[in-house]
Image: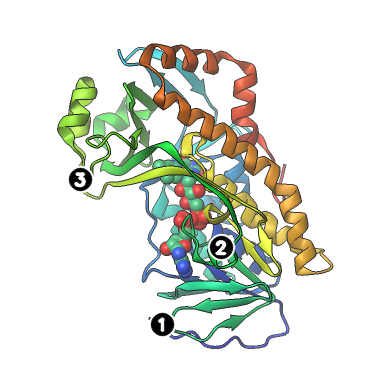
Amino acid sequence: MNHVEPSITTGRRRAELAGAGIAGLAAAIALAERGWSVRVHERSSALRAEGAGIYLWENGLRVLEALGTLETALHGCHPGWRRETRDDRNRVVATAQWSEERGRRVVSVVRQRLLGALADRARALGVEIVLGSEAIAARADGTLVLQGSDPVQADLVVAADGVNSKVRDSLALLATRRPLADGAIRVMIPRLPEERASEEGRKYVEYWSGHRRVLYTPCSDEDVYLALTTLDTDVRGKAVPLDVGAWCESFPHLRPLIHRIGGGARWDRFETIRLQRWSAGRVAIVGDAAHAMAPNLGQGGGCALMNGLALAVALEGAASVEDGLADWERTERPLTEHTQRVSALYSRVTTMPPLLRAAVLAWAGRSKWVTGQRMRTALHVPTGAKA
Ligand code: FAD
């Protein structure tokens, strides 16, 4: 483990953060840009992004722009233009279309690239990222307790240590933690030249069969991200390494694709986390630690980015850290909770019989109201971002 030096008094406001994921790095950059002296404690010995690929919608892209890292993060990404949802007989039941115009964009990115871009930007702004430094608790007075080192004191502590946040739990802030019925295996496979060249290979496609779903997502010229979702009770379906036979039985038409899946897959059950409050004294909780959600809207990371930036903005003019954090929660929490609700509703379609699901998905694809609910987060102009 790296030794953590006691903080040096610089006259600048000091923030100690736990977790160098999307939320922690976004908050770190936004704070550093506003003059804070920032240190991020990351438990792992390297900055590793779990989960292969990620969708970023307009809201997330605006945050990356505000953080000064849009171009680097999106270098080599795949711009989304069309998504198809196909039923159990491989018939298209719903489509969505996007453009590369500002306001309607969605892209898919290799997670490691996104994380690397955020970390580079943070370091360029003077943020110290301490690897192998695990946070185990915090106190409302601004103390962060670290495994194997002396506690550190700051004007602000940010817990961005993910869904199993130790810092959050040390403050007893959890209101509910609800596992959903489904989860996903995520994996990256190399993209073939014919996929790069064909229209088919440039689409996002969601294939359904029974309770199982394969989401095909080109992420870069070299990479295709696959998310295979199913019920948590589906023992063969959720097995890792992947039970290739089980998935080929459900998707005979995708047999060549499924056979391309190698190692490195992981299973994650979806869950929704709700806190009593997003802060305690000088400690803020952000990202999955505060508001994990089902990934059906592809907005968990988007909300982590938005709330990380908004946190720093809220503290800019606040009379005290405590006041700023209360304002931050009041402003940002409603949209995050809307996103959690809509995303969890989409998890329900996994449990539906195929014919009903196809009808519901077709109706949802046509309904302006449903589309409005689903797209509200993507079309929101985040606090601190340009319209
Ligand atoms: P994390 O990414 O979990 O990062 C937490 C960091 O803290 C890690 O680096 C970890 O090592 C570190 N850490 C943990 N404990 C400690 C500790 N005690 N001390 C110090 N460091 C610690 N979102 C999207 O926007 N688009 C998508 O397309 C999308 N797809 C998804 C697909 C699936 C299947 C799933 C499960 C999620 C998906 N999400 C998506 C959600 C997104 O991945 C998360 O919302 C996002 O990663 C949350 O970021 P975070 O920084 O809060 O947490």
Q: Secondary structure at mark 2?
A: helix
Front disc: 3 or 1: 3
Q: Secondary structure at mark 3?
A: loop
Q: Amino acid at mark 2?
A: Arg
Task: Please indicate whether residue 92 sits to the left or right of residue 343 in the image.
Answer: left
Which residue does the numbered mark 3 point to in the structure image?
Answer: 241
Instruction: Residue 221: give its label.
Output: none
Q: Measured from the top left, where is residue 114 in percent x and y?
A: 46, 53
Marks 3 and 1, how far apart at CA: 33 Å
Q: Earlier in the sequence, mark 2 or mark 1?
A: 1
Front disc: 2 or 3: 2
Image marks 3 and 1: residues in contact by CB distance under 8 Å: no
Q: Measured from the top left, where is residue 70 in percent x and y?
A: 55, 51
| In front of the other: 103 or 17 | 17
Q: Earlier in the sequence, mark 3 or mark 1?
A: 1
Q: Measured from the top left, where is residue 107 in percent x and y?
A: 48, 38
Please identify the quadrant where the C terminus is shown. Answer: top right
Q: Residue at x 42, y 14 (%)?
A: 358
Which residue does the numbered mark 1 point to in the structure image?
Answer: 2
| In front of the other: 82 or 262 | 262
